[in-house]
Amino acid sequence: AQSVTQLGSHVSVSEGALVLLRCNYSSSVPPYLFWYVQYPNQGLQLLLKYTSAATLVKGINGFEAEFKKSETSFHLTKPSAHMSDAAEYFCAVSGAGGYNKLIFGAGTRLAVHP
Amino acid sequence: GAGVSQSPSNKVTEKGKDVELRCDPISGHTALYWYRQSLGQGLEFLIYFQGNSAPDKSGLPSDRFSAERTGGSVSTLTIQRTQQEDSAVYLCASSLVGLKGQGTEAFFGQGTRLTVV
């Protein structure tokens, strides 16, 4: 069975500050991990993914995430927040085996203030 | 098509009516998913298709909900006797399945906003 926990339903940062969105997963098989972003009234867009290659994954818009097996974590970071980063962020896990159901966390809404 | 297409984009229906939501996945994507996103909630998994079969329909909330997929392509999610609690955005996604069976990222449609009045 797989599950995802995102700590903090709302995160607020100042423009230019570090963004840290937390994701912990549980998986009975080697996981594939994803971060998606959803802007208001839009669909979900993939930010980055981990599929057992490099543990530090770089995505679009300056975001990156590090897979830490010992901590079962896949936290999303960005060194300097922009106003345009305000959105909802979802962490997701799927199995590396033949079963590919994507399980999502509850989401974290990021607010960026001047 | 270039992306996952869902129709209609908005649907308002009266309580008790049946509705059909359509998803047209990216050509060649064998995996298809339906999710529900309610106000203030995360993404709730409904059903997963691999080709035309649904190995996991554990997320369908009641027997009023059903889905099918034909020709390994278009999928329809049907909600019978709609209730107000069915109001939500219904999202469809599709993905490739790799040679070793591993999944790749899912591409999402813009969703269908269902309002039951």
Image (cartoon, coloured by chain):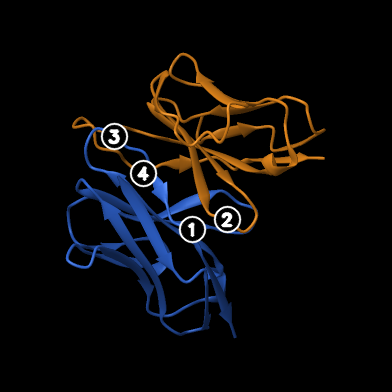
Q: Are discs 1 and 4 less than 8 Å apart at CB?
A: no
The residue singled out by tag 1 in the image is A106
As drawn, the residue found furthest toward the front would be B62
Report the Cα–Cα distance between label 3 and label 4: 13 Å
Label 2 packing within 10 angstroms: few (<14), some (14-19), many (20+):
few
Mark 3 in CB contact with mark 2 (< 8 angstroms): no
Name the residue carrying label 4. Answer: B105
CA gap between label 3 and label 1 equals: 21 Å
Mark 3 lies on a secondary structure that is: loop
Disc number placed over residue A99 in the picture, else none: 3
Task: Tell me whether marks 3 and 2 sit on the same chain.
Answer: no
Q: Can residue B59 be seen in this view?
A: yes
Chain letter for the orange colouring in the rendering: B
Q: Can residue B75 be seen in this view?
A: no
Q: For marks 3 and 2, give the CA distance.
A: 25 Å
Measured from the top left, where is residue A101 in percent x and y? 36, 38
In the picture of the structure, the residue carrying the numbered disc 2 is: B41
**What residue sits 32% from the left and 37% below the top?**
A100
